[in-house]
Image (cartoon, helix red, strand yellow):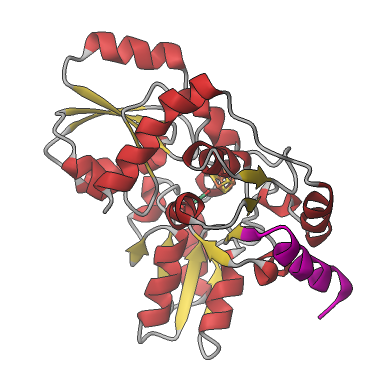
Amino acid sequence: MNGIKSRIESLKKEKNAVILAHYYVPAKVQEVADYIGDSFYLSKIAKEASQDTIVFCGVSFMGESAKILSPGKLVLMPDITADCPMAHMAQVSKIEEVRREYDDVAVVCYINSTGGLKEHSDVCVTSSNAVKIVKALPNKNIYFIPDGNLGRYVASQVQDKHFIFNDGFCPVHAEVCRDDVEAAKKAHPGALLLVHPECRMEVLEEADYIGSTSGIIDYASKSSAGEFIIGTELGVMYELEQKNPGKKFYPLVSGQICPDMKKITLEKVLKCMEEESGAIEVEEELRNSAIASLDRMLELAR
Ligand code: 13P
Ligand code: SF4
């Protein structure tokens, strides 16, 4: 084991810390994590972890959600500037306007959002549970924030509700288009196409499977097929290849990289553990109002 890794391992024991990592952070960081997963899995672990300290290797909405769910724990982020641009792409004023316009409306908030948006929402969802949760809601109208693409995907699966969409998007997924799919299928004619629902509808329509990062990894691992085109951030390749040494994985487009997730390096993980820097603070008032939407997600997804 190299020096940095062994130092991180000793600090875990010394500080009673657990390292959580999203599939999009660099492979070297995933290697030192105790838990690697999609946003839903990691939020459950953050709530249930027995350790005093959580080192969250991901972007700011992930660390903030962990702190809201586990306020008594020290939540450290290796780089507090790692942020998801989509998390800011909705407005509270618009939520209030929609609430005035529709009587029977649920504001459904993708977990990729700020605490300030969660505070004004009825329930949070992730890409792995959004369809299930929206189906379980009693409301007829759904205002889905911030991701318009995920919202439209959920609407395509839940046809008895009326949706109001927001125009937020993930810059890493929304740039992929139908021409990219055509080119990838031409280059790899036998391969199955697995995509994340943050992609545009024209891409989803061509897919053999649509799901969260964990969903994509599970699907490829259980499938009897041997070749796959992967339409999500390329950090998932690490786990896909670890779990499936005999299978082939091709990126749908080259360079599908989230620059914020890639800010998390092994050196920064070590530094934040040594110095206990990058601690996430959430004001009590915000926490008290934002926790309801996260708790409701955990309850409805069960
Ligand atoms: P998952 O919940 O599928 O891991 O997605 C998180 C994310 O940021 C996708 O861009
Ligand atoms: Fe946000 Fe997109 Fe990066 Fe996910 S991949 S963290 S949605 S910018």
Q: Name the quadrant containing residue 63.
A: top right
Viewer-proximal residue among 28 and 49: 49
Residue 224 place in picture, x, y as percent: 35, 87
Q: Is residue 53 visible?
A: yes
The residue sitting at 75% across, 62% down in the picture is 14
Residue 3 place in picture, x, y as percent: 88, 73
Residue 37 place in picture, x, y as percent: 51, 62
Viewer-proximal residue among 184 and 299: 299
The residue sitting at 48% across, 57% down in the picture is 38
Our reading of the magenta stretch's main secondary structure is helix
Magenta residue check for 10: yes
The residue sitting at 49% across, 39% down in the picture is 112
Residue 89 place in picture, x, y as percent: 52, 27
Answer above or below: position of 245 versus 239.
Answer: below
Viewer-proximal residue among 76 and 15: 15
In the visual, does 89 lie left or right of 6?
Answer: left
Image: magenta residue range? 1-19
Answer above or below: position of 28 versus 24.
Answer: below
Q: Name the quadrant containing residue 23.
A: bottom right
In the visual, does 70 lie left or right of 110?
Answer: right
The residue sitting at 60% across, 35% down in the picture is 85
In the visual, does 164 lie left or right of 102?
Answer: right
